Amino acid sequence: MVTMTGITHQTIMRRTQSIFTLALGLLLSGAAALRADQAALATQTFKPFAEQHCVECHDKDTMKGGLDLTALLAKPDFAKESALWTRIHDRIAEGEMPPAKKTRPPQEATKQATRSLAAALTEVDAQKQLADGRTAWRRLNRVEYQNTIRDLFHIDLEVKEMLPEDGTSSGFDTVDRALDISPVHIEKYLEAADAILDAAIVKTQRPQTRKVRYQYAEDKGELGRSIGGQVLKLDDGSLVFMNELYPPKLMREAAVREAGRYRFRLSAYAWKSGGKTTPILIYTGSQNPQAGKTELTQTFDAPPDKPKVFEWEERMQARDNIRVVTMGPMKPWPDKPESYQGVGLAAQWLEVEGPLVEEWPPKSHTTLLGNVNLAQGTLNDANAILRRLMPRAFRRSISETELAPYTALIKARLDSGVKFEDALRVGLKAVLTSPDFLYLKAKPGKLTDPQLASRLSYFLWSTMPDEALLTLANQGQLAKPDTLRAQVERMLKDPKAVAFTDNFTGQWLGLRNIKATNPDKELYPEFDELLERSMVIETKTFFNEILKNDLSVVNFIHSDFAMLNERLARHYEIPGVQGMEFRKVALKPEWRRGGVLTQASILKVSANGTTTSPVLRGVWLLDRLLGKPVPPPPKNVAAIEPDIRGAVSIRDQLNKHRNVETCASCHVKIDPPGYALECFDVIGGYRATYRKKADWNNRAFVDGKRMPYGNGPKVENADKLSDGRAFTGIDQFKALLLKDREQLARATTEKLLVYATGHGMEFKDRAIIEDIVKRTEPKLYGFRSLIHELVQSPTFQSK
């Protein structure tokens, strides 16, 4: 397919693939072997311990758990079998092996055995990192790519959906192992480059900004027809809506005919709300289900009886609409609208202005091209454009040698008679498909200052470094400890730090999966989109509160406050919270909230929409917050599906697993955290009994109203941890977790390290984790302090 004169996608793909092949070939060179003396020492120390305490159950004849230690010890290879040796080390160090029913080895013998394994495994990583570095070259993921394009070209363009989905490893899409590249990627990057250049370079006149105001008092009945007659005209010129405002006439006249940013202003107030505010929900997108989808993008509080003007801006695509929905308590619709006794929204007018254009030509055009006239450009002009773009695109200074191939591409096109603009686009597309743009590259050892700037920026902003960071980096000043601390503070206070909150919590806490399940409407009729949106905002604002004030990471387990709005507080049965705005609320013990464990978002993403499972929630908690992930179940073990009719309890089913030796070692860890959370349903509501589907006569009553569900068996939320400590309910369980605050800090630091450096945990990383945790102990493991110490660490500042 020819995309410009004299050059094809296939040609560029071949050239680009050859660069990637060379680069990735270097990355795949083998790691250095473990020093023979270290391996021999580990074997010499561990073998007698294993023969006395382990091989009885783990020889070639017995092979419990599929492990033959005699074969491993005969030819130990700590490099190739590091994952297995790590698991052996951990199970012995944590006292899981030998099992409790066996004779316990002397404490000193256990320490010597685990120290020898730890030394060998650490040396494996050290040798590999010395040769290749800890991380591989890491490709920008889709979010980082889009944000980088935004900041590089000053355009607001949705390009991530043009690219293939990213993989994940160790729980994050920033990890090198998950971010491979394929010919499909290269082709999509070329397509994206065309779209980017089309958006950045303008050849049209300045778009006309139009402002249209729709006065609801002037409605001739069209609104009533469009929403089923649920409108009432008031003397002050307002129309009262009991459900939604959908002004098709306005949107036709306002004509969101082209993509861009639009400003909306709505004058409205709550009607018959008893002196209380009522929520307004703003949906944006295509109102035609076949053309696209709408998204809840804004929420406001309509004041009672007195009009207020609400103003907001939205990025709109051509032919997009908005929809205004009121969420006041609905009541049966009477024969006459004026007899309605429920809450309504009185709207006076709605105004639309756009597309909003701050300057023309836009910054995207002038930053890229300067004053170059595309109709009269020369090779010198193209060279000047590349000199401006490439240092920012590659996130470092460039040499004449690096510039030359891109200039040569453009020159060859010009010499063959291609127009300047088409020739220039060849060079620009080559820049946008270069490994220097798409990858975070480094050589083994300490990062250069520009590389450090990129690692820091993609950690906290998910985008390229700004001018301040690059200036410090090019001056060789960034790596100085005081400078680095000052920059971390500046970056965390910058609005772009919202990317850290969104992307880290989105993956660490699973918030990206909030829409993965749809709660059963019969079992959970109170669930709505506003509640779902509030769930996510609660967790993010809670995260930001901890980050901003350097609060201890133990608050993720339990806190004496929550960040709530009225919708969420009503869901949690917490009184005294009014309005859609989130605010810090002091908690009482009887409310059974605090920390992320009891937040509705977490409880929803760890359930399936109909039922909860102690196994799913237990695995989630062990991995995400406690730093003790469990391996996946054996392939021959069937998954447990709870019987929602209540005939067989989930506890009965799980007890069967605990009685199976191959299952017990994991379920004794997994099940207790899951049971502690069983008192919360699939949407995070507190419960004493399970809900079940029931016929009319057996349905439950809440506040005098018959529900579409019935009450099932009583919830059992008592158990004991693997070390024997018993608990009943979530509060006692959290109290047990809080006894090991160091482990909670260690677990959080591990997640930060993986996300920030783009590489999964290695055995050698354990030492740096311990150092970071120790350094933050005087500050009670403050979350902001953890980030500072992580950035100061040699691991963060090395490849």
Image (tube, rainbow, N blue to C red):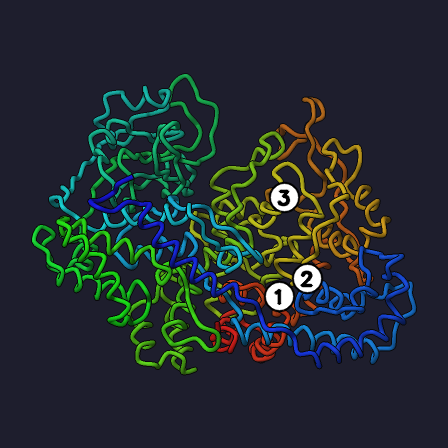
Residue 427 in sight: yes
Type of the residue with mark 1: Ala
Type of the residue with mark 3: Ala
Residue drawn 53% across and 74% down?
Answer: 131
- Identify the residue under disc 2: 628
- How many numbered marks does the figure carry? 3
Decide: is 649 above or below 151.
above
Q: Where in the figure is residue 559, as x and y percent of width and height?
A: 59, 62
> How crowded is the residue under tag 1: few (<14 C-alpha within 10 Å), some, or many (20+)?
many
> How crowded is the residue under tag 3: few (<14 C-alpha within 10 Å), some, or many (20+)?
many
Type of the residue with mark 2: Lys
Numbered tag placed on residue 607 in the rendering: 3
Residue drawn 79% across and 32% down?
Answer: 647
Viewer-side residue, 570 vs 281? 281
Could you tell me if the residues under marks 1 and 2 are in contact, i.e. CB atoms within 8 Å? yes
> Disc 3 on helix, strand or loop?
loop
Which of disc 1 and disc 3 is earlier in sequence? 3
> Disc 2 on helix, strand or loop?
loop
Numbered tag placed on residue 520 in the rendering: none
> Disc 1 on helix, strand or loop?
helix
> How crowded is the residue under tag 2: few (<14 C-alpha within 10 Å), some, or many (20+)?
some
Q: Is residue 325 left or right of residue 176?
A: left
Quadrant of residue 232 in the image? top left
Numbered tag placed on residue 747 in the rendering: 1
Q: Where in the figure is residue 218, as x and y percent of width and height?
A: 21, 27
Decide: is 175 above or below 89.
above
Viewer-side residue, 572 vs 178? 178
Mark in front: 3 vs 2: 2
Mark in front: 3 vs 1: 1
The residues tagged by marks 1 and 2 sit, at their Cα atoms, a distance apart of: 8 Å
Quadrant of residue 700 in the image? top right
Decide: is 724 above or below 269.
below
